[in-house]
Image (cartoon, grey):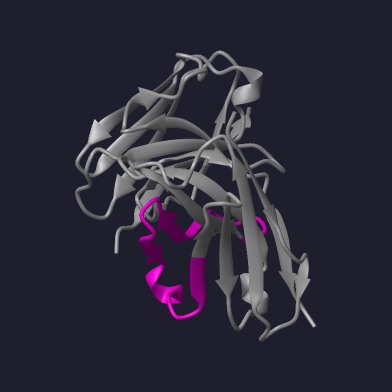
Amino acid sequence: ELVLTQSPGTLHLSPGERATLTCRASQSVSGHLAWYQQKPGQAPRLLIYGVSSRVTGIPDRFSGSGSGTEFTLTISRLEPEDFALYYCQQSRAFGQGTRLEIK
Amino acid sequence: QVTLRESGPALVNPTQTLTLTCTFSGFSLTTYSMCVSWIRQPPGKALEWLARIDWDGATYYKTSLKTRLTVSKDTFKNQVVLTMTNMDPEDTATYYCARTNSGNYSHDYWGPGALVSVSS
């Protein structure tokens, strides 16, 4: 069974900084890696699918990359609204999440 | 405009069967590659995929919960129904339905979620 491990668990950064979130898979996966953002009390929102394809309407400061077993979500310059919980997902597996908090 | 909404009981007793309905609009579950998945999230915990039903009626279940889950669809009503038997307090969670793309397995539209508590 595929396991996705996200790191770090929590990331403390300031607005304007660059955020790098990592998702590692227990086995090599196809290019079907997705990233979601979740804010308190809300459903997750799809940001990136197919490793690097940005959903329409998602700002271009969000980008995805990676292959094999290691994938990355990068937020180039953090805006106040970006501080949230982020999940990676591949097929039936979700990572445990990375919480992005304001420093 | 694609929308989904979950409905069902907010509270169930242990050992009871939970039935949740996902009512959607803006797409058809008869269209090739369209799927609907159920995903849950216990309070303060991560997302957990439960089940999926595809446009052709194919169904898929989380292996560890396979014996307790059933998913079905009513294409005329634009509804997907999830039943989970033998509910336990550990099943307390927010249950989401989401539209799923069978080509890349991403969930592009989500319902707001339904919080289900299991308690006597």
Q: Is residue B95 visible?
A: yes
Q: Residue A85 is drawn in which quadrant?
A: top right
Q: Is residue A9 visible?
A: no
Relative to residue A85, is residue A65 drawn left or right? left
Q: Nearer the viewer, residue A82 or B36?
A: B36
Q: Nearer the viewer, residue B92 or B101?
A: B101
Residue A11 lies, with reference to residue B56, above or below; the image says above
> What percent of the width, then of the height, locates residue A7?
42, 43
Relative to residue B116, is residue B70 drawn left or right? left
Residue at 52% of width from left, 52% of height from top?
Answer: B75
The stretch of residues the image draws in magenta is B42-71
Q: Nearer the viewer, residue A6 or B9?
A: B9
Relative to residue A89, is residue B8 drawn left or right? right
Q: Residue A53 is drawn in which quadrant?
A: top left
> What percent of the width, then of the height, locates residue B113?
67, 50
Residue B52 inside the magenta-drawn segment: yes
Q: Nearer the viewer, residue A18 or B94?
A: B94
Residue A42 lies, with reference to residue B75, above or below; the image says above
Q: Quadrant of the C terminus of chain B?
A: bottom right
Q: How many marks?
A: 0
Residue B75 inside the magenta-drawn segment: no
Q: Quadrant of the N terminus of chain B?
A: top right
Residue B32 lies, with reference to residue A93, above or below; the image says above
